[in-house]
Image: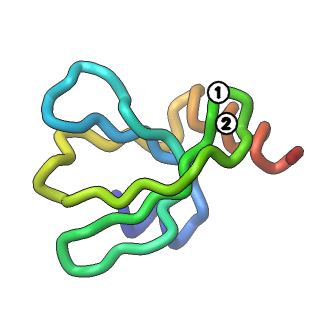
Amino acid sequence: MACFAQENHKVVSIELLESGNYDIQGFISEIKDTIITVEQLDDYGKKDGISIISFSDITSISCDSNEEIALTLLAEKQ
């Protein structure tokens, strides 16, 4: 799913270490070896930094839910 999201410029929500929450939301900018780089978005679709995540820390990735679609629309308006 990470490759699909990167290739199609989709917002993803990522849960880390079975936290029960989506800890990071944004666009995947790079996938390299065992690392994902995410351009984070805040709740209003504004850029909010960059996260570098190890694949082994990811427990769930969501793409194309209503929340991600809304964030995509907000980000496009920035």
Judge by depth and name the residue closer to the eye, 45 or 69. Answer: 45
Q: Residues within 10 Å of mark 1 (few under 14, many from 20)?
A: some
Residue 64 on image: x %, y %: 52, 41
Q: Quadrant of residue 55?
A: bottom left
Residue 68 on image: x %, y %: 57, 36
| Residue 34 disc label | none
Q: Residue furthest top?
A: 20
Q: Are marks 2 and 1 in contact (CB under 8 Å)?
A: yes
Secondary element at tag 2? helix
Residue drawn at the location 52% of the way across and 72% of the way down: 7
Q: How many marks?
A: 2
Ranked by sequence position, the earlier of labels 2 and 1 is: 1
Q: Quadrant of residue 35?
A: bottom left
Camera-nearest label, 2 or 1: 1
| Residue 71 disc label | 2
Residue drawn at the location 20% of the way across and 46% of the way down: 58
Q: Residue furthest bottom?
A: 33
Secondary element at tag 1? loop
The answer for how far apart the CA atoms under marks 2 and 1 are is 7 Å
Judge by depth and name the residue closer to the eye, 58 or 63. Answer: 58
Figure check: 49 above or below 61: below
Residue drawn at the location 23% of the way across and 38% of the way down: 16
Amino acid at circle 1: Asp
Amino acid at circle 2: Leu
Residue hosting label 1: 43
Q: Is residue 32 left or right of residue 18?
A: right
Q: Residues within 10 Å of mark 2 (few under 14, many from 20)?
A: many
Q: Residue furthest right?
A: 77
Residue drawn at the location 34% of the way across and 58% of the way down: 1
Q: Is residue 16 left or right of residue 1?
A: left
Q: Is residue 77 left or right of residue 75?
A: right
